[in-house]
Structures are given as C-alpha cells and as structure tokens.
Amino acid sequence: MSTSDVVNSPSAAVAGRFGIYGGRYVPETLMAALEELEVAYAQAKDDPAFQAELSDLLHHYCGRPTPLYFAKRLSEQLGGAKIYLKREDLLHTGAHKINNALGQGLLARRMGKQRIIAETGAGQHGVATATVCALFGLECVIYMGEEDMRRQELNVYRMRLLGAEVRGVSAGSATLKDAISEAMRDWVTNVRTTYYILGSALGAHPYPTMVRDFHRVISLEAKAQMLEQEGKLPTAIVACVGGGSNAIGAFYEFLPDANVQLIGVEAGGRGTALGQHAARFQKIGGGVPGVLQGTYSYVLQDDAGQISLTHSVSAGLDYASVGPEHAMLHDSGRASYVSCSDDAALKATVTLARTEGILPALESAHAVAEAIRLAPTMAKTDVLMVNLSGRGDKDMGILARELDLKGAGANADRV
Amino acid sequence: MPIEFRKKPGIVAYLTAGDPDLATTRDIALAAIDNGADVIELGVPFSDPLADGPVIQRASERSVAQGTTLTDVLGIAKELRAARPACGLVLFSYLNPVVRMGMKTFCAKAAEAGADGVLLTDMIVEEGGEYLEAMHVHKLAPIFLAAPTSPDARLKAIAAASQGFVYAISRVGITGTQQNVAGDAAELVSRLRKFTKLPIAVGFGISNAEHVKAVGEFADAAIIGSALVALIEKSDPAEAPAAVGRFIAGLRG
C-alpha cells in the first residue's frame, strides 16, 4: 500500500503508524500502560454506552454542535472566497481541547484511574483537563512551562480555581516540549495509578489516533453543516498546527474528498532561523524526521540531533515536533503546510475582532491570517473554512502588550 | 564480546559524556575501569532526556550546552577502547541523535570505535527491526531495558533481543538515587531469569556499597549512574577522576 492509499482511507491508520511516521518510542516502563490504554480505548470506542455518554456530554455540557458561521463582513472586505468559521471557540472552556479532554477523562474513569496528569502550552488543554477532573472528581496535576505560565497567566488561575495543581517547569525552553517531558517523567514514576491525558495528536501510539478520533467530531459536523448551508463541500480548509489536534480534527472527514484542499498553518514566529519559529514543515530552517517524546515525525533539531528551541507568540503552537499524521499528510501532499509570522497573527486578530466582533485565540489567528491572505486569490464561488480552534480571552495580556491598547484609538495599523 | 562481569557482583558505571568536558570524561572512565568497573556506559547527552531524573538531566544540559555531539562521544569511546582493550564499553543514548546520524551509519561507527554494545533508552523491542539488523551486522550487543511493569511476554521478547546483559530497572520511575533498593527489583530479576541465561544488571537508584551488596544477592551486576554523575557534579574537574576511582573501589565493600 502506497502512502497515498493510506491517506485516502481514513480507517487505514493501523498499529500506530501513519505511513512511516508515528510508532512507539518510550521508556520500557510505560509500555504496559500504553498497551493497557490501547486495549481500553479499543473497547470504549466500540462500546455504545461510552459513545452515548460522550455525545451527551459534548452536547449538554460543552455546547456541541458548534456553529459554522458565515463571516460575511470579513468575506466582503477581502473580496474573494466566502469565509466560514467553525466556531470551536464557543465550546465550554473556550477551545476545541475539551473534545479530547472529555473523551480521555471518560476513558480514565472507565479504567479506574483516580489521578490525572496533563501538560499544557497555552493552558487551554490544562483548563479542559482541570474541568473534566472537576466534573468527574479526579485528582489533577498539570505541567506547564514557566515561560508559558507567564504568557498565559489567566489560564493558570483558571486551572487552580478548578482545583488542579499547576506545576511549573523551568527546564529547557520552559515551554510545551519541557512540560511534556515532565508529564512523561511523572507518568513513568506513577504509571500504576495515573492516567496521562495527552493534549495533542502526538506522542506514542495510541495517543495520535485516539486524540484525532476525539476531535473528528469537528469535521463530522462541519461536513454536514457545509452541505446544509452551502450545498457543497468547502474549496479549502485552514487550521493552525501546533501539535496538530484541531487541524487533524478539522481535516479528517475530508481526507477522502480529494477536491477539498487542506492547509495547515504553523507558527512562523520572528523568522526562518532555527529557534525563531515552530514551522516544522518549512523548507529552509524547518524540521527533519526524528524521534521526540514517543513518536517519529518532523522535529526541529540541530545537525547533532539536539532538539531546537522554538518561538511563537502563541504558546499553543510553540512546539518542536508535530503530530505524525500531519507528517504523513505533508509527505503525500494531501495537505499543505504554510507558516504565518507572529506579526501577521496579531494583525489577523485585530482584523477578525473588528470585522466580525470575534476575538480569536492567537493560535487560531494563524489560521485566520492565512485565510486573509488566501481568500482574495480565490473566486467568489469558492468557500474557505477556517477552524477557529479557540477564543482569545486568555491572550488579553499579550495582546495588550503587543498592540498597545491603552489609548482610545484604533491601533490595528501599528501591528 | 568483552562484556563480562569478572567479580560478583559486576559494576557498570554510567557517565554522561562531556560532563564536565570530554577529556575529563575519558579520565573518569579510566579511573572507574582501573578501580573495578567492568563496563562503562557512555551516555550521549540529549536535550530532552525524559527517562532521567534531575541529576542526569543537569549533566546532559551542561554537556549539550558545550556542544558535545554523538560524534564526540564516539571519539571518546575510541580512545577508551585503545587505552583499556579488555573493558566492556556500551554506548547509551536517546534515539534522536542516533536517528539524525542514521541508524546504519551509527552502528558502523560504534563498532569502528570499539563499542561492545548499545543501549537506546526510548527504543522498545517491537520497534527494533532496522536497529537490530544493523547491530547484528556490526557484531554489537543490543541491550534492552526491562521494567517492573513489563509483563512476562514482554520480558521474554526483551531477553530474546538482548545480548551482553539485560538491564533490569530496579523500580518504576526515572533515574536517581534512592534510600533502599526496592523489592520490585528482586521480583523482576527472578521473572527475567526464566527467559535468559544472560547476565542481569540492575540499575536506577543504586548509589552505595550497601545497595551493590543487596543487588549482588539476586542479580549479576549493579549499574551506578546518578550517584556517579552527582559526585562528578560536586567535584572539581581535576579531582573528579580520583574521586570516582575511590567511589568505585569502595562499592564492593
């Protein structure tokens, strides 16, 4: 089976491999837990009672289905494709992350694990996990890089308010990568009693598959909504890619629809030099295939195989590797990956806020920026769907600093 | 294959290469060998050592900050092999530096440097295909880790894929010193014994003569890692080889 065959069949991801990517590269201590998780997830997935409870909570607790909103003013202003926003930002806790945290939380409870750990970058996965733990009465420890704690202070307070313990990580770049390493250390130590709710479509099998499955609901809904509202599938779908969970959720049901372009947007940061961005698929200064934190995928690294530092204005995209399914989609050409600079993301934030009254998360603003760039190049009959993965409340501190919002006037042009 | 434990229990000494610098690592390794270490595990520093505790993590950070590469570590291995032809020499690494060099190239270079075996801490037996083939071609011993959480079926596969010795992790957790050698270790070693005649070495948390003696009652060798690295961390670089030599000499009581 060629790589393209795998891509064309959404159910073909078997045994944790996506083409040559994925797999399981972990300390032996974790293997029993990964095998236990794989079995438990396979059983839960096929259990109508599990799926019914998940669906019920996604609907009544989280607010699914999320709207597919036609951004009329933005579309008119850009003068090209019709832009639709898949409103994951309207979910309880403010981002798509709750889809996965809820699914894994239910699984943890089903497996009888009373202690939950998670890592978080922008804090949205941490908040979602803390929320689910509060809902199910589970002990919750969240690892977060100290740099990210500083950048996303409001989310640190939210997690603590929800009863979670937030543990700062000062190692390395003190961002998402280091938080994942600390969470894995905790898991290695407490593996018999602890469930690790990994927050993106990353890590060792079965996580990339499981996390994707829990976010698949995004594209399932979007496909039906598109057909209902437009009578056709979108021309293109744009989503930001840190680990890649919202993007794989938004892409998945459209993989067999070859006419639907899939575009992932990585963090272009301040420039193309290693250390200034998190654009793993960027041609120059981008990643090469390697192993980080349990999976084989594209990794930003130096010539000796040391993991590179990264930079993004959005903590949620600031990661040196990327989910293995995206690596496969990249190589096969089924999805394309572009990058967007910090400045363009900030500017897109302001544009969306002022045309539609919607404040996107800085992560999602990367996707919005690409849509703003792309839409004018497309025909008015084209339809562009942006997965608006989260809302920007958490970013107010950064936005206030970066945009100089002190004055009464419009500062959008200064970005 | 010179991986051999001449005295009971054998001593395996782990060092993070390039901490505090490459020349000192070489001198420390020589001192360890001359004072009774049977096998040197030469650790390739890595930016994200997720199986390691704070002591080895700090050593890795110091070494990476100095720019130590896998190629440098192979160079030290070659010098050690030339200086002490009879000692056991194992390269210890996380996967990514090896994948970056290329698995086959790495195995060829490791053999050329005179290494006897390789231990990749985030490589599990199921993923070992290309690695095991290349190791076999170059007559290198693949050493796999066995954990207290590994069920018997996994222990059987780990034992079958390993050569030289099997590394039994003394307890669930990351590397680092502990007060007592947990009961987990003896149970794991007795389960492993059913599947292999290879020597079984116990590591994670072994830090003094008492621990070594305890390990010697149920296993073939003790692996000393964090305790050595911590001793190096607090020693003046010029004094570190002598300090490590004295420490190793005292381990068999």
Image (cartoon, coloured by chain):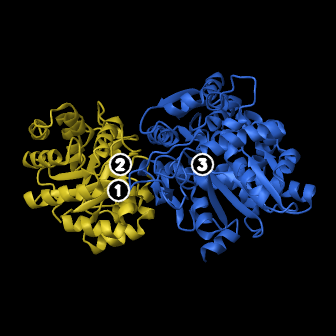
Q: Amino acid at mark 1?
A: Ala
Q: Gap between marks 1 and 2, in whole Å?
A: 10 Å
x and y percentages locating residue A216 in the rendered image:
73, 54
Q: Colour of chain A?
A: blue
The quarter holding residue B130 reads bottom left
Q: Gap between marks 3 and 1, in whole Å?
A: 24 Å
Residue at x 44% of width, y 63% of height:
B127
The chain containing the residue under callout 1 comes to A
The chain containing the residue under callout 3 comes to A
Q: Is residue A195 above or below residue A219?
A: above
Residue carrying label 2: B46
The chain containing the residue under callout 2 comes to B
Q: Gap between marks 3 and 2, in whole Å?
A: 23 Å
Q: Is residue B78 above or below residue A195?
A: below
Residue carrying label 1: A304
- Sort mark 1 into few (<14), some (14-19) or many (20+) by Cα contacts within 10 Å: some
Residue carrying label 3: A242
| Nearest the eye: A357 or B35 | A357
x and y percentages locating residue A125 in the rendered image:
63, 38
User: Is the N terminus of chain A in the top left, top right, bottom left or bottom right quadrant?
Assistant: bottom right
| Nearest the eye: B15 or B165 | B15
User: Is the C terminus of chain A in the top left, top right, bottom left or bottom right quadrant?
Assistant: top right
Q: Earlier in the sequence, mark 3 or mark 1?
A: 3
Q: Amino acid at mark 2?
A: Phe
Number of dots carrying numbers: 3
Q: Secondary structure at mark 3?
A: loop
Q: Amino acid at mark 3?
A: Gly
Circles 3, 1 touching at the beta carbon (< 8 Å):
no
- Sort mark 2 into few (<14), some (14-19) or many (20+) by Cα contacts within 10 Å: many
Q: Is residue A91 above or below residue A32?
A: above
